[in-house]
Image: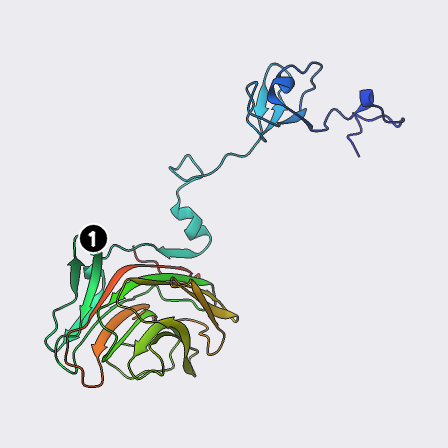
Amino acid sequence: MGLQSQWIKEVMTKSKMNNMTIIGENGTVLAGLTGKFKGQVVVSYDTSGGFVQWHLYVWDGTSAWIEATLPVHKHTGNADGGPFVDLFINNNQFLEYNEPMSHIADWVTSNTGTGSAVNVHDNGTDIARRYQTGTSSTGFGTGTKGGAVYMNYSQRILFNWVWQISAITNVFFSFGLDMENINVAQNNNNKIGVEWCDGQANANYYVTTASGSARSSSDSTVALTTTIDGVKMLFTPGGQASFVFDAGPTTINKSTNLPSGAGLGNNALREGAKNNNGGVANRDLRILGMRVYHERNLGQWVIA
């Protein structure tokens, strides 16, 4: 198949090849081509003769090969693919990415008992947002971040949390999307998160989801530890919440009681720890890193 102006209905021979056929050769060979036609396209097998390997070029009909390969957009400025933020605005996206742990002022925090207020913990190696239970049996520390930008469980969601818990006895801790305040009763509101309390059957992390009418947790099979841990979660609406723990790595897919629709907004992100079963020793929950990426509803506000 060729252009009418370039083809004649005769037996095809090498001399009658369509001038619009893409010619592939090494750059030095392409640079020496004669009898070129305007609009002729070539691809170089290597970087030589002024050509770049695997890039396309078009002859301008006069004196130059014009590169036709689309440039890579790295969005380093408005002239390079446009402002990066436009990618999310035009595709109805919102990104909360690698929030600095020192931004405690962006969170609503509370604590009770003898524990210190939520604070920045810097041991010279790691910086964390630290929640402490104190030495009261009812002590807890918690933080939440929400507002007009809430979770949209009808779209895909990705989160990543990195944490460290100081002990694995007499403690209850949790973090995730729309999780309950650590000091209130569990409920069935839409949510996805990771939690553990010493009332669980195994000393393993548990992954939790709720659909608005039912809430359930599943054993991750990943043992608790007092060293730094991490998890990544990809939520597919109507499919599953897939949790990948750093240990192993180990993957657990949860497909029951999945959230749908919108979260509450007032606790889109939630973290916290409390003493449990009469424990009176201070427990630390240190959040060393977190990021959340989600697609938002058209009608939502985005707060800078």
In front here: 251 or 240? 251
In the displayed structure, 67 sits above or below 248; it is: above
Q: Is residue 114 visible?
A: yes
In the displayed structure, 162 sits above or below 178; it is: above
Q: Is residue 179 visible?
A: no
In front here: 222 or 20? 222
Q: Residue at x 58, y 26 (%)?
A: 46
Q: Residue at x 41, y 47 (%)?
A: 86
Q: Is residue 280 left or right of residue 223?
A: left
In the displayed structure, 300 sits above or below 304; it is: below
Residue 81 placement (x, y as % from top left): 45, 39
Q: Dot 1 surroundings within 10 Å: few (below 14), some, or many (20 or more)?
A: few
What's the amino acid at mark 1? Thr
Q: SS at mark 1?
A: loop
Q: Which residue is mark 1?
A: 125
Q: Quadrant of residue 281?
A: bottom left
